[in-house]
Every structure is written in C-alpha cells, then in structure tokens.
Amino acid sequence: MNDRKGTSPSPTRPRGKNGQLSQRGMLSIVMLLISIGTLGIAMIGGAKLAYDVLGAPGETQTGLFAAVIALAITYALGWLTAMVAIRVYGNLILPILITWLMWACLAGICYLYVEILDRLYEQQYDFFRFWKYVFVMIAGLTVLVGLHLIIEDHNLRPFSFPLLFISVIQLGLIVYRYVFIGGKSIYIFGDLFFLLGMSAFSILMLAHVGLLDPLRKRFTNYFDRNSISIRTQD
C-alpha cells in the first residue's frame, strides 16, 4: 500500500516552472491524441467490418483475416498509449474520453445484437455465417472489456443493463418463433448458444465478481514499479 503511494503518478501539470509547456504535459497531450485517434479509427473500422459480416452473402468485400489483424494492431496501439498516458503521466481528461468511447462501443454492440437477432429469427444463415456473428460479437465485447481495464476502479454494472434487456427480448423471440410460429428445430441450438453466451456475459458484468481483478492488479503493479523510470521528470 505504501509503495503504491510513492510511485503512483501525480496529475500531469501542463506548464513548467517558467510557464512553458513541460515535457510531461506535452507527452501526456500527444499520447491523449494518439490514443483517442487510434481507438476511434479501430472502432470505425470495426463497425465497417461488422457491417460487412452482417451483409448478405456475396456482398462482403473485406478480407476478414487481414482486416482483423489491422484492427487489432490499431486497437492495441491506442489501448497501450491510453494506459501509459493515464497510469504513468496521470492524464485526467483521457479517462472521461475513454468512458464516452465505452458508451459508444456499448451502443454499437446493442445495435449489432439486435441485427443478429433479426437474422437468427429469420433462420436465413448457415453454419459458417453463424460463427461469423459469434466472432464479431466476441470482438465487440472484448473491445469493451479492454477499455474497461484502462480506467482504475471502473464499474461495468451500468453497461450490463441494455444487454440483459436485449437478452430478455431474445428469449421472448425464441418462445414466439418455436411455440407460436414454428421453424426448423435445428436452428434452436444457435439461438440458445447465443442467448446463453450473452446472458452469462451480462450477468457477470452485473455481478461484478472481480474476474478481471488479477489482470487489473498485474497492470497496476507493473506501472507502479516502472512509472518513475518511464516518465520524464519535468
């Protein structure tokens, strides 16, 4: 506890002793711009990739493997830069911007979830396209959790409510589809797989049981040990 107090970064002062921009302040601002820029590019690219995956067969023009690599590198750069700006240079603005990005990411995930539900309900997909839907949803949730890890003591509970609400809607659609309308019984396995996966993820977010605490502590301990050697002193 005492060691962490001695090494934790203080909020970056943008002005030095002579009123000029300090190196720490300049680096903090630069990393803020880089992190928000790269994270924004990654999220826009991810939205385009999700649009391609949800498109009708034959409409997708994007090479999935190459697109995933490009987006993963871009997101990783923004994530690491944001982590250093907050944990090393004590940037106070970036956590607020990251929170806004998380809400934007959640809105995109909810929209994606609803669009996937429409396709599951219509039963107009094959095995390969179903796993594309699963992959895109996992990618979106991973981005959300990654942003969550950047901010210390961040609470994911509020982000679980929209997902739980849509999961309840999905359950109602499953009952309506197979009890009142009817459909090919084989598709129910895909419906239930998606429902159980999203419900489990949302419930874990709501329960806040601390599954990510070991990973968060690892990041915190690393930057506590190395923040002084990483950041400039002026």
Image (cartoon, rainbow, N blue to C red):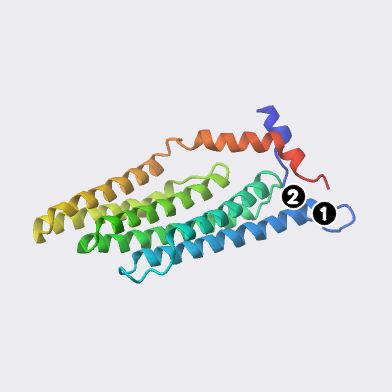
Q: Residue furthest top?
A: 2
Secondary structure under badge 2? loop
Above/below status of 53 relative to 8: below
Q: Which residue is mark 2?
A: 12
Q: Earlier in the sequence, mark 1 or mark 2?
A: 2
Tell me the tag on residue 190. Answer: none
Residues tagged 1 and 2 counted as in contact (Cβ below 8 A)? yes
Q: Residue at left 27%, top 60%? A: 117
**Taking 54 as reference, is 229 left or right?**
right
Give, as a three-letter code, the residue at label 2: Thr
Residue 159 rendering spot, x and y as whole percentages: 42, 51
Secondary structure under badge 1? loop
Q: Residue at left 58%, top 43%? A: 152
Crowding around mark 2 (Cα neighbors within 10 Å: few <14, some 14 to 19, many 20+) is many
**Taking 205 as reference, is 153 left or right?**
right
Q: In the rendered image, which quarter contains the N terminus?
A: top right
Give, as a three-letter code, the residue at label 1: Ser
Residue 115 rendering spot, x and y as whole percentages: 32, 64
Between 142 and 174, the one lying in front of the other is 142
Q: Residue at left 52%, top 33%? A: 214
**Taking 8 as reference, is 171 left or right?**
left
Q: Which residue is mark 1?
A: 22
Between 193 and 9, the one lying in front of the other is 193
Give the CA distance from mark 1 to mark 2. 9 Å
